[in-house]
Image (cartoon, coloured by chain):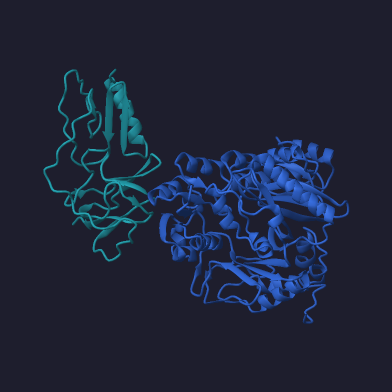
Chain colours: A cyan, B blue
């Protein structure tokens, strides 16, 4: 089974109008991942029989019959400071992004995918920096201001508290 | 299954008290807090603290999912829900079960049955308890008027989805029914998420008397005596005592047996309380509801029996059978609890803010359950309970004298408290002679703030 371009467009529209940043749809061997916001998208090698949909919005969806192979990252893992159940990092220069809810912190939209951001990346205001999950319910961690990611203070999979410092950002000039 | 680590899902004095009992039993205690409670006493005493949300209870203490997530993250074995908040939430208990967390309390099924106040009465009758004449679930104010006429005024409108004095309105005639129905339904909805109401006959000169029960997973059920909680303002208890006075021996036995029979019928596990309204003139006790949680006023029972009810909750939850039989339970002396609130005496206007000096009484027979300390800032987001002053004496007269002394030595600087008001209650001849009922506080003390009947002429 595959989705028609119109169906994909409808799904993207639903995502657009919702509060969510990521949508994952999986059924009958088809996996659709749609993601809002800027940042590098993992490349997907087209496989036989794939019918790439025309992107109706800025972020093209990925459709594939097979789950895309995880991208091997050539960069070293980003610097992560000791931070689980930590304080508010009030001694940090720059702007601190705090957890809007308690929950399990994820740096990437799905297991094995590239993280939303790494140290050194520049993001716009409202960009998704990570996800917080509580009982399979996801909330996006967003940058309040545009700027550069200076530090990542929690690790992928950590349980973080409400208000816990997750990222330090330097304001964009 | 031994419990090694408990997640305390509550705040204030009960959270501090639960942490303390866990530690006494060599069990680790992790406390969830809202942002406003990071500096609370429970947080200071706990082994670990997890901030689960902002001050608003809906986003923190009532957020079942985030609390369970926190419990799993800290690898707790069990969750203690305290009282209020999610303590009687079947959904929360179920969520715990689904995630292999022991919920310290009865099963979701029992919570559902006792949580539905109409069903609870049906079950109580099945267990042989008397109930006041009451209606079915009410569809409308018109239905309520009809039911009220059948039952006979005065009647009381009550929330079907929960107790604790919320969503209650007393009516003496049908005229105010429309407004009362609306207001009660709104309050019930806000408190329990269920706007459903029912009606009961209202007994004006009655006492609110309840029985403490304990049940284990082996089917054993015992009672730990009764308590009188008639001193109420707007259906909120202010002063409680144990044992209840002026109960005939027959009636005392009857309510205790009724309570254990109901608990047995339910297969009740944990600590619970069966509440009655007692019509002294008729010499009859009517079941009104069962509270499937530890209650605020549990310390009076603890002082009489020497049994730590929270410790018993932990033992029961770990699968251990009760190691106390009914014959082992002995009730010695008399205990009185005064709820010290951060409210102005008599007007009961909330008074949050910084406690500049917190100096509670401490002498033989005096127990103070509190989360307060000098320098603590009382957050404005939660209830106003500062402390429970619980005093024991070998008899009621002595308990009253010691309570007066304890209140005189209870110094709080900063917020206004109800201590002066409590002192007046302790000096009132009606209280001393145990001549009160559920409307007494409002009618006698509050409608007459010039303190008719109060004698401060020493002890």
Picture quadrant of residue B241 = bottom right
Question: Could you tell me which quadrant the N terminus of chain A lies in?
Answer: top left
Question: Could you tell me which quadrant the C terminus of chain A lies in?
Answer: bottom left
The residue at the point 34 percent across, 57 percent down is A85
Residue B94 horizontal side relative to residue B172, left or right: left
* Pick the front one: A27 or A85: A85
Residue B245 horizontal side relative to residue B385, left or right: right
* Percent x, y of residue B246: 83, 61
The residue at the point 30 percent across, 52 percent down is A144
Extreme right residue here? B281
The residue at the point 23 percent across, 43 percent down is A116
Extreme bottom residue here? B458
- Does residue A31 lie above or below B348 as drawn? above
Residue B244 horizontal side relative to residue B376, left or right: right
* Percent x, y of residue A103: 37, 48
* Pick the front one: B175 or B423: B423
* Residue B104 seen: no
- Does residue B428 lie above or below B11 as drawn? below
* Pick the front one: A148 or B99: B99
* Residue B402 seen: yes
* Percent x, y of residue A19: 37, 40
């Amino acid at each position: 089974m595959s989705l028609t371009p119109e169906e994909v467009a409808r799904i993207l529209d639903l995502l657009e109008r919702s509060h969510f940043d990521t949508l994952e749809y999986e059924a009958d061997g088809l996996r659709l991942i749609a993601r809002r916001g800027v940042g590098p998208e993992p490349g997907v090698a087209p496989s036989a029989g794939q019918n790439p949909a025309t992107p109706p919005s800025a972020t093209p969806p990925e459709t594939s019959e097979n789950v895309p192979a995880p991208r091997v990252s050539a960069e070293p893992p980003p610097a992560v400071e000791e931070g689980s159940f930590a304080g508010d990092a009030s001694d940090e220069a720059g702007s601190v992004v705090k957890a809007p809810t308690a929950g399990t912190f994820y740096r990437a939209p799905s297991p094995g995918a590239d993280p939303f951001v790494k140290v050194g990346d520049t993001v716009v205001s409202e960009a998704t920096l990570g996800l917080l999950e509580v009982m399979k319910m996801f909330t996006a961690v967003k940058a309040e201001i545009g700027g550069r990611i200076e530090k990542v203070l929690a690790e992928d999979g950590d349980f973080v508290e409400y208000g816990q410092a997750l990222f330090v950002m330097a304001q964009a000039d | 299954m031994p419990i090694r680590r408990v997640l305390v899902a509550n705040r204030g004095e009960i959270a501090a008290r639960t942490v303390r009992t866990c530690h006494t039993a060599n069990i680790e205690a992790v406390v969830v807090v809202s942002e406003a409670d990071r500096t609370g006493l429970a947080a200071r005493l706990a082994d670990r603290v997890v901030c689960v949300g902002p001050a608003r209870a809906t986003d923190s203490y009532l957020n079942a999912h985030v609390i369970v997530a926190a419990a799993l993250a800290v690898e707790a074995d069990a969750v203690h829900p305290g009282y209020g908040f999610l303590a009687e939430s079947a959904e929360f208990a179920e969520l715990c079960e689904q995630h292999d967390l022991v919920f310290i309390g009865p099963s979701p099924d029992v919570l559902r049955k006792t949580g539905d106040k109409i069903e609870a009465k049906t079950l109580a009758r099945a267990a042989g308890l008397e109930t006041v004449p009451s209606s079915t679930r009410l569809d409308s104010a018109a239905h309520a008027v009809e039911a009220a006429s059948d039952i006979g005024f005065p009647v009381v409108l009550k929330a079907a989805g929960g107790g604790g004095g919320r969503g209650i309105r007393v009516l003496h005639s049908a005229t105010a029914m429309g407004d009362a129905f609306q207001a009660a339904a709104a309050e019930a909805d806000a408190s329990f998420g269920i706007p459903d109401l029912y009606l009961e006959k209202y007994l004006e000169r009655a006492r609110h008397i309840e029985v403490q029960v304990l049940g284990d997973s082996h089917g054993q059920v015992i009672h730990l005596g009764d308590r009188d909680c008639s001193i109420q303002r707007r259906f909120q208890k202010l002063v409680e005592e144990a044992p209840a006075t002026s109960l005939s021996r027959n009636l005392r036995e009857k309510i205790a047996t009724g309570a254990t029979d109901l608990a047995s019928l339910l297969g009740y596990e944990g600590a619970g309380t069966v509440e009655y309204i007692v019509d002294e003139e008729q010499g009859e006790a009517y079941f009104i509801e069962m509270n499937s949680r530890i209650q605020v006023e549990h310390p009076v029972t603890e002082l009489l029996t020497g049994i730590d009810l929270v410790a018993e909750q932990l033992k029961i939850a770990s699968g251990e059978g009760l190691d106390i039989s009914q014959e082992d339970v002995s009730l010695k002396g008399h205990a009185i609890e005064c709820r010290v609130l951060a409210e102005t005496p008599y007007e009961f206007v909330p008074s949050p803010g910084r406690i500049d000096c917190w100096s509670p009484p401490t002498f033989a027979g005096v127990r103070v359950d509190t989360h307060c300390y000098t320098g603590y800032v009382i957050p404005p987001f939660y209830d106003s309970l500062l402390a429970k002053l619980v005093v024991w004496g070998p008899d009621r007269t002595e308990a009253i004298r010691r309570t007066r002394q304890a209140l005189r030595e209870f110094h709080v600087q900063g917020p206004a408290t109800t201590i002066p008001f409590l002192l007046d209650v302790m000096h009132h001849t009606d209280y001393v002679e145990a001549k009160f009922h559920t409307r007494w506080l409002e009618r006698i003390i509050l409608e007459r703030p010039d303190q008719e009947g109060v004698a401060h002429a020493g002890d």
